[in-house]
Amino acid sequence: MRLKVEQLATALQKAVAPVYLVSGDEPLQLGEAADDIRKAARAAGYTTREVISVESGHEWPQLGLEADSLSIFSDKKLIDLRLPSAKPGTEGSKALIAYCQRLPEDTVLLVTAGKLESAAQKSQWFQAVDGVGVIVQVWPLQGQELLQWLQRRAERKGMRLDQDALKSLAARVEGNLLAAAQEIEKLYILHGATLVAKPWSRMTLPIAPVSTCSN
């Protein structure tokens, strides 16, 4: 199953999948999506966490060992596999395919990776993950998608920015979501949710509180 990053939270509320692949070259979205999966797994009882960071390629046998090993406390387990290069290589491909063909009980595998090339999405290991788990790919945001992301981020703090404020913020951060999140956080800390603020140069950003009334 393939999900957009904004669909992940809803999916996690319904169930935790046995395998997740989160990939992309936008670090804030990637990190937060992985954190959401870890939190959902922990809430579902997967309290043991084993981290495997693939650096040289010699770490792949550890995936099989973790899949076959049982916790001495019989806890559910999250295997947190980090693949910075987004290229598992021959050994990694075999390890991931084998894992997906024989999913261990009471175990969730979370794979975080860099941006995947189009050829990788046609590979056997990618198809194996797609067949049993969830794939979330994150992308740098531009245009209307960036404005929508900024609005959602502000609403999480109880704020709502009008279009002029959104466009000013988007122009300032130039697609850097980490910088955007920091600016929204500073805006909230300094001015709260109901004030008109001047956080950038001479620009005034009108802010209105999110309505809590339901229809």
Image (cartoon, rainbow, N blue to C red):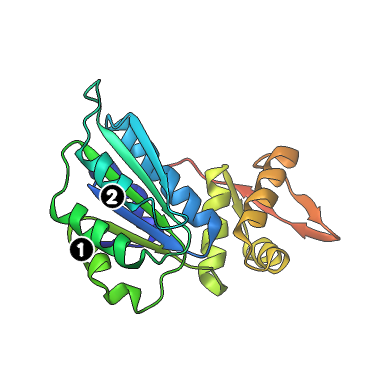
Residue 178 in the image: x percent, y percent?
62, 54
According to the image, label 2 marks what residue? 11
Q: Quadrant of residue 112?
A: bottom left
Q: Earlier in the sequence, mark 1 or mark 2?
A: 2
Secondary element under disc 2, as helix, strand or loop, is helix
Residue at 73 percent of width and 41 percent of height: 191
Q: Is residue 198 visible?
A: yes
Q: Residue furthest right?
A: 202
According to the image, label 1 marks what residue? 128
**207 or 189, nearer to the observer:** 189
Residue 12 in the image: x percent, y percent?
30, 45
Q: Is residue 175 left or right of residue 133?
A: right
Give the amino acid type for the residue marked by disc 2 in the picture.
Ala
Q: Residue furthest front?
A: 58
Q: Quadrant of residue 75?
A: top left
Q: Is residue 147 above or below residue 211?
A: below
Give the amino acid type for the residue marked by disc 1 in the picture.
Ala
Q: Is residue 97 left or right of residue 42?
A: left
Q: Residue furthest top?
A: 73
Q: Is residue 140 left or right of residue 207?
A: left
